[in-house]
Every structure is written in C-alpha cells, then in structure tokens.
Amino acid sequence: MTRTALRRGATAPTVSSAPNDASVASRPPTAPPPPSAEAATPFYGGGVGRGRAGRADGGVRGPALVRTHHLQEQKARGEKIVAVTCYDATFARLVDGAGVDVVLVGDSLGNVIQGQSSTLPVTLDDIVYHTRAVARGLQRAHLVADMPFMTYWSAEVALPNAGRLLAEDGAHAVKLEGGAAVAGVVAQLVAAGIPVMGHIGLTPQSVHALGGHRVQGRGATARARLLRDARALQDAGCYALVLEGIPRALAAEISGALQIPTIGIGAGEGCDGQILVLYDMLGLNPGFNPKFLKLFANLGDEVTRAVGAYRDEVRVGSFPAPEHGYQEEQAARPTLAVAR
Ligand code: KIV
C-alpha cells in the first residue's frame, strides 16, 4: 500500500473532483430539530443500562455515559470529540478506559477484521456480532453501529435493520453513508427514535460510484454539493456527521455552518472531533500509512516481536518454566488456579 492511499485496496487519490452529483432529496417537512441538552434531561436520572458514575479510571472526565446531547454540548464548548472504531470487547475496555467519547463499530471491520478489500461484503449480522461484543466492553463511551451497504436503501429496509442494532446489540445510534439522497431515510429513523450519525465525503460503500477512494469535495460543484448534503442531513435530524476525505478548508466551513458536531477522518483540524480506525492508529497494519493517518503506536512490530520471542522459547524449551506449571495439590483446584 502506498503512503498516499486513502483506504486499503485504494488507488492513490487524484485531484479530480467527484463524479456526477448525487440526486438531491428535499427537506422532510417533519424533520426534528437537532438534539438539545434540555430535551435530553434524564427522566430516570440517567442510571439505566451502561454508564457508571464514579468510575475509578483516572483522567477520564465528563459524563458517566456519553449521550448525543453531550456531543452537542462539547461542540458548543469548543471541546474536541474523540472517536475511534472498535470491534471486540477487549479493545472496547481499553479504549473506554482511555476516555474516548465515541466508539464506532465501523464496517471497516470488513478490511481490518475480515481481510476484505472493501466494506461492501460486510453484513448486518457481522455488525450485530461485533456490536454486541463491543457493548460488553464499554462503560462510558457512546456506541455507534455502522449500517452496512444496502441495509438502508429505503426506510422500509432501514427501520428494522437499525432497530435491531439498537434493540439487540446495545448500540446508542446508527451511522449511515450518503448525503441529501438519504435524508428521507434519516428523517424516518429519527422519527422512530433512532439517533443517526451521517457520513459524507469519501463514503467507502460508494467506492465504485466514486471511481475509487478519492478525496471528495474538490472544485466548486462538488464543494457546493457537500455543503448541501451536510445541511440536508442536519435538517433530517442527524445528531452528528462524519466528514471523510475532504479538503481541510471545506471541512472547517461545513463544521462552522452546522449546529451539529462534525467528526473528521482525513478532513483536517477544523472538524469538531476526529475518528480513526483503531487498528490503523495502533500500527497493526504495517504498510498502511496514508497521509491522513498518524501512528500513535507500533503494535504490529510489538506483536511480531512478542510472538517471535514465544516461538523461540517454546522451541528451546525455556517456556513454560517450572513456575508456569501447577503442583500436585494445586491441580486439585483447577478452576481457582486458572481463573482470571
Ligand atoms: O467504517 C468505519 O470505520 C468508518 C469510520 C472510518 C468513520 O466509517
């Protein structure tokens, strides 16, 4: 993979603008206003489900459970929103303990978990499985589940699918890709009580329609269309918007124009928050190093080193050492001896 690739299996981004404009749907007449802190005042005291006040983890500020209105308030305070993707309970515990605000079970799992070259083969069952696992590991973070390709092409299809992600899996919201063309579906999900995060710009489920993983929103027409898309999604009731793979200045302009928070990936510092694919930022994909990505660790090298050391010790017989084994009397209580 080259340094300039935007996604796995991507060709290098070009300077061309997006192809044809997507169709533009009109604003739904019943679109609810963006969520406000007042509207979200807890009726039951906020103690239901995940989220525990007084959690022992040091350095984690903010609410016991991050809700949509907290993200809105963070934008109002100019406090950046921190989001990462996650796909299992072990990493969920770790990122939650580190104090991220939002965890997304992204369809990027098709790439980083399943080894696919795009997100298109990811199914709703895949997202359901991983969202359940992640929910078990979280205490504080706001959990968003991605809606896979073709699971929201009409409201009739989207409603039961999104409902399943919230009802069965512990997600607090769903995310779906697309601009004004999906505003009608968004409005119906929101009307049904399902918080929706939008996603515009480089939308990987449209990789073939976009002609590859290219930076979007370059040129006056594409720029105007993205601004229109962003407003349409806000008007339809989205509580937040992912901006992916667009010029920094455009992302800053959209973020300034919207009341709802924007969360950027490859969209520069002007967004209200940032999201990265966890495996990418941890350096678990050696060779995947696009321009927008910063490696905050190099766990790939560390895993290879550790497993290599294990291999060597097993081969020479230095692992397991006597202290890793059980005595006769301990063997009589095996469940205690191996309990985590
Ligand atoms: O699927 C995903 O991981 C995403 C984020 C990169 C925004 O959509």
Image (tube, rainbow, N blue to C red):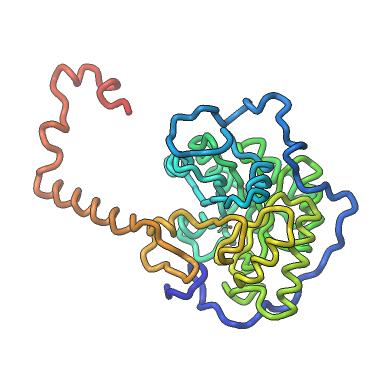
Q: Residue at x 56, y 33 (%)?
A: 64
Number of callouts: 0
Q: Residue at x 72, y 54 (%)?
A: 152
**Could you say where residue 212 lies in the image, as x and y percent from the top left?**
58, 75
* Residue 126 against residue 170 in the figure, above or below: below
Q: Quadrant of residue 142?
A: top right
Q: Position of residue 47 (x, y in %)?
A: 62, 25
Q: Which quarter of the figure is the C terminus placed in?
A: top left
* Residue at 60% from the left image edge and 28% from the top image edge: 49
Q: Residue at x 69, y 80 (%)?
A: 219
Point out the residue furthest to the front here.
77
Residue 86 or residue 225, whichever sits in front: 225
Q: Nearer the viewer, residue 39 or 124?
A: 39
Q: Quadrant of ligand 1?
A: bottom right
The quadrant the N terminus occupies is bottom left
In-image side of 107 versus 339 (left or right): right
Question: Where does residue 240 sit, x and y in percent of width and height?
Answer: 68, 52
Residue 176 seen in render: no
Q: Quadrant of residue 259?
A: bottom right
Q: Quadrant of residue 246?
A: bottom right
- Judge whether 213 appears above or below 310 on screen: below
Could you say which is closer to the camera, residue 113 or residue 289?
289
Measuring from the top left, give residue 48's x and y in whole percent. Answer: 63, 26
Inspect this view and state whether residue 88 appears. Answer: yes
